[in-house]
Image (cartoon, coloured by chain):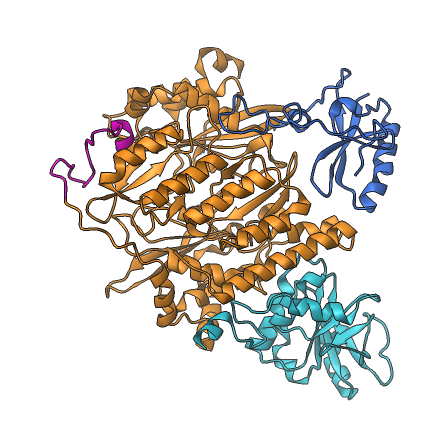
Chain colours: A cyan, B blue, C orange
Amino acid sequence: MPLIRGGQFVDDPFFFVPDGKAYPDEKGAIVTLARFQGEKETLFARGLPVGVRLASSENPQVLKADLPRIAAVVLEFPRFRDGRPFSWARMLRTRFAFKGEIRATGDFLYDQLASMARTGFDAFEVRQDFALDDFRRALAEMTNVYQPSADGRRTIRDLRAG
Amino acid sequence: MARQMLTANRLRDGAVLYWRGGGWVETLAEGEVHADPAAADAALAAAQSFVARNEVVGTYLFDVQPDGTPVKEREIIRARGPSVRDPILRKDGGKQAAAPVPPVPEDPYNVSI
Amino acid sequence: MYRYDEFDARFVAERVEQFRGQVARRLTGELTEDQFKPLRLMNGLYLQLHAYMLRVAVPYGTLSPKQLRMLAHVARKYDKGYGHFTTRQNIQFNWPRLVDVPDILADLATVEMHAIQTSGNCIRNVTADHFAGAAADEIEDPRPIAEIIRQWSSLHPEFSFLPRKFKIAVSGAAHDRAALKFHDMAVEIVRNGAGETGYRVYVGGGMGRTPYVGYVVSDFVAKPDILSFLEAVMRVYNEQGRRDNLFKARIKILANALGADEMRRQVAVEFEEIRTSGTLTVPAEELARIDAYFAPPEFEDLPDDPADGADGMPRDIPGVDPDFLATNVHPHRAKGYCIVTISLKPIGGVPGDATAEQMDALADLMDEHGMAEIRVSHEQNLVLPHVRRKDLPAIHARLTELGLATPNAGLITDIIACPGLDYCDLANARSIPIAQKIAERFADLDRQHHIGELKIKISGCINACGHHHAGHIGILGVDKKGVEFYQLQLGGSGAEDASIGEILGPGFGKDEIADAVERVVEAYLTLRQGPDERFLDTYRRVGIVPFKNVAYGQDLHAAY
């Protein structure tokens, strides 16, 4: 699945490794939370980047102690109407100061990209025919924002204050 | 066996539509009554092509009595327009009260979508 | 009134174009109906029983003459010549075409109006006391904080896909005219022991299938911290509100499951973090800047009238219907002024409707008398908040010509009703015709005054848009095998003494319900201890049994 990161299509440095499957050679692995919790040390010992995939019901609080060693947190949208990942992303950025990749996977819409970027997502697994121009357009539809989020953007109130 | 009719809303303006002969008409009276459940299901299946073409939304079957009157009050109101009695202000008495007569489509039983 | 600056104007204009793009993508099929539905709802657009319905926000219920004229224009150009004011300070248009909606929104944007978040599982249009800035019993005008909340909640990136809708109300007065305790969250302006004003915050109120009266989650939030506090509540809800069952997804269910103590604890944890980060602090200068927009008009120094009653209310004004004075004219904080309720409940009319002609004429009336604003109440009426008492005869005369002087505010015919099965896709039974029937039954004004304050609220389904749980007499329409039935509930209140009505028993047929209401009212009249004891007071004193005994009548009783 194509991956947009930092506003560009990039080669995915990770494989998602389903539970029970072997780790790939030479490439970082994204695993489920359950597998991560069971095989944490083995994973880190590989010396390759580690990613953890959270279901929308899984609060990233459980990763807190391990975050400095985690390269990517993948937040899953089971349905685009499930808005929990927005809060998880923001929590990762503002509460835990997570600097790694926050990736969106699953069912989300063009119309949600701007909010995702605002709350801290910086990587997006998109469908094959998705155009980068659309990604840029989605982020530019609304010039200004009323409320602070994880993106550190100046809000309308900041702009009013000059 | 219950008789059924098929309805939907036109996507671009929301108008209530009824199925007839592989297309849509705007009034219940012109709509097709299916005495056979298999025929009703077939109509519903056929209507999905209009959904796929983004012409209609919300297709569903509803029961009608032998004289063609819908069983449920909801469908009677949907067909006739709001039942609000003696409205002081409202000018939306529904389809019968609609002032302009819609132009006659080429196929008298098929409203262009 | 609040005025958009360049930022607000650009925001709304871009939002219109964003929606125009969404509509275009729907029409080409790039968006499926499943994908489009939440997006259109977030911009107030429903597909109802007959047609699309557009719900336009009237933030905190305040409209200028210019805005009222624009609503009239929309009604005429894109709809059927009328608008319908709702129980949450919105106006609904029942017949717009999808393809026209972007243009409607563009027209509305020219007068600083929008439909942003009037539906959908997001933070909805913030409502406020419709007497704000005029009421004699007010600590502070609630609209500045409502505007601050409006801005904060607009396209909030974290809270636009909540488990379910989220409604916030704000009030600054002792008497609750905003149904605070029936909101997902409510902000009440209060004064603490040190004499500072701040906010008491309630959560977990709601009606619908499982009604709850909200509880206090903080007794006092300091002014600069209010958005941090609200955000903390939202985060607890977004993370933990149920998403497995639509009927259990509102915050009231979570609030009840957690209990007040645990809710307070969790909110406090989030609040502390957000507050100390400082990013959501509302600086005093910002509050002052917004406050300035809502500064009251310069009230003239008008004399007291020695004939006034002790409450400062005029008793008798030549040329003004004394019934109108008694019910539709209310005390104002400034001498020589009063507040006027414009009833949208003519006997036999549709509760909450106004025609384009009426809206235009009201705008003219406002201009003639130098009135800058009109309000929309959650009771589906309009309110002129600052009326010079000396103008009352002229204003009353004009309202009479317009069919807008029905002297029934707060009386039994001032009925709240949802659109019901006549318009709504979710309804199980009709509401408007029942309201009309009951209003006609009690049309006699002397009888209405004799009965006194009695709030009837009618919903056509369990979702309770007509607030039946909070009616002194509540009526809930249900569907029994395709036939409409109506349950009676007694003893609800949406005011500061909030309570949920108790179900009387089996439902009544649509031709029986007005009779049943009448029997309940007659029972009240014999039970009450004098004309000052309201229906609600009597009910609370004697309980449901005496009403149950009479409501079903001899013949009906046998039938059940």
In the visual, does B84 lie left or right of B34?
Answer: left
Q: Residue at x 28, y 48 (%)?
A: C135
Nearest the eye: B36 or C348: C348
Q: Position of residue A125 (x, y in %)?
A: 77, 70
From this view, report whether residue A121 is shown above or below residue C114.
below
In the visual, does C36 lie left or right of A147?
Answer: right
* Furthest-top residue in this view: C555
Q: Which residues are magenta?
A: C304-325
Say whether residue C483 is visible.
yes
Nearest the eye: C399 or A92: C399
In the visual, does B39 lie left or right of B104?
Answer: right
From this view, report whether residue B60 is shown above or below residue C156.
above
Residue C528 included in the magenta stretch of the image: no
Which quadrant: the N terminus of chain C? Answer: bottom left
Residue C318 included in the magenta stretch of the image: yes
Nearest the eye: C374 or A48: C374
From this view, report whether residue A13 is shown above or below residue C43.
below
